[in-house]
Image (spheres, rainbow, N blue to C red):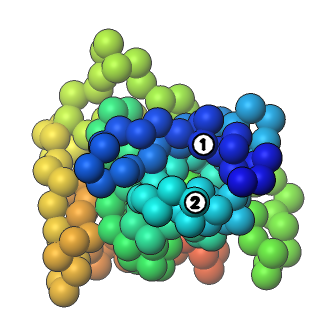
Amino acid sequence: MSEISEDAYCAGWLVDLEYELWQILTDGQGAFGGMALGEPEIKQLREHSDSGVIFVTHDLGVVADIADRVLVMYAGRVVEQGTLDEIFYDPQHPYTWGLLGSVTRMDREPPRRLPAIPGLPPSLLNAPEGCHFRPRCPHAFDRCTEVPGLEARVSGAPEHLDRCWLEVGEKRRRREVEGRIGLAAGAAA
Ligand code: SF4
């Protein structure tokens, strides 16, 4: 076993003895203990342990390299889940749009300033009423004071779930920001 995969084993927790599922927590850059964990390391871990891996990170570049399925969490709730293609090419939740919009792309001119999601995550001791993303969402409207269910809203994609009240067609229109997916600040309804 390589040094890297030994470290990766140290980073994991065996959470289910029958199905052998590893959970790896990283910092916001997809690193653990100063070591970058990317596609090669995760593949090594999968091969050595013959198990599934839950990889927790903010680094969508790493996610794009290694994931089959993606869960997007915000303030204690899953706000979207689906296959890698569903999340990256047809994202349904504004928080996911914000995450994707803040990723630099090698095939585009870098923006002068990297887009960021305005505001801060809420305290879970005093979470906002309704949708937890509402105070930061430029698309919020009256109904957002109710908690949206985690539901399949996209026709023909029963396992693509999201927690946002906007209609699917409206989401697809609003997430287009200057030719790419993003959270259009100031585009509130
Ligand atoms: S539109 Fe409403 S439900 Fe959807 S993410 Fe924004 S605040 Fe939440």
Q: Secondary structure at mark 2?
A: helix
- Residue beneath the point at 29% across and 26% down: 128
Q: Are marks 2 and 1 in contact (CB under 8 Å)?
A: yes
**Residue 131, horizontal then vertical, whole percent:** 26, 40
Return the x and y of residue 76 as percentages of the image width and height.
Answer: 33, 33
The amino acid type found where label 1 is placed reads: Tyr
Task: Name the image quarter holding residue 69.
Answer: bottom left
Q: Which residue is mark 1?
A: 9
* Circle 1: element type: helix
Q: Is residue 144 left or right of residue 170?
A: left
The residue where tag 2 is placed is 48
Which marked residue is nearer to the observer: mark 2 or mark 1? 2
The quadrant in which the C terminus is found is bottom left
In the drawing, does residue 141 fall left or right of residue 64? left
Classify 103 as above or below 153.
Answer: above
- Locate residue 22 relative to residue 182 in the image: left or right: left
Q: Amino acid at mark 2?
A: His
Please report whichever mark, 2 or 1, sits nearer to the chain's N-terminal start. 1
Image coords of residue 85 (percent x, y): 45, 79
Residue at the (42%, 24%) spot, across then down: 122
Task: Kindly identify the residue that appears in the image at 35 percent across and 38 percent down.
Answer: 15
